[in-house]
Image: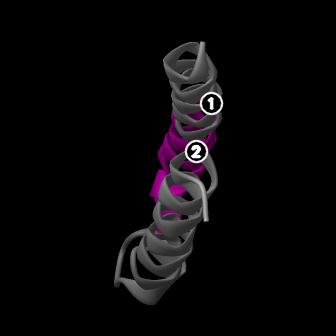
Amino acid sequence: MKKHITVPIALLIYLAAMAYFMHPSRHPGGESDFVRYYITIGVTIVIIIALSYFLKRKEENKKK
């Protein structure tokens, strides 16, 4: 598989695992951290998408 596909998929799997284990409702007294939790997930997804885009461009430029 191509690098611009495998790296983001691996990071998304990691993000899903971390999101599950770090969910505020799984920790006592963590109910107030929902906004921070979802903002962190959103920013991480944006970074993963940007990484995928830049890796794809790097591979295309390498072919030329």
Spot the residue most to the front.
64
Residue displayed at 54% across by 74% down: 13
Instruction: Give neighbour class at mark 1: few <14, some 14-19, many 20+ (Cα, 10 Å).
Output: some
Residue 56 percent across, percent down from the top left: 62, 30
Q: How many marks?
A: 2
Residue 25 percent across, percent down from the top left: 52, 80
Q: In which quadrant is the N terminus drawn?
A: bottom right
Residue 56's disc is 1
| Magenta region, main secondary structure | helix
Residue 13's disc is none
Which span of residues is magenta-colored? Answer: 31-47
Q: Nearer the viewer, residue 56 or 18?
A: 56
Residue displayed at 49% across by 42% down: 40
For marks 1 and 2, the one nearer the N-term is 2
Amino acid on which the number 1 mark rests in the picture: Lys
Amino acid on which the number 2 mark rests in the picture: His
Spot the residue most to the left.
28
Residue 2 percent across, percent down from the top left: 59, 54
> Is residue 38 in the magenta section?
yes
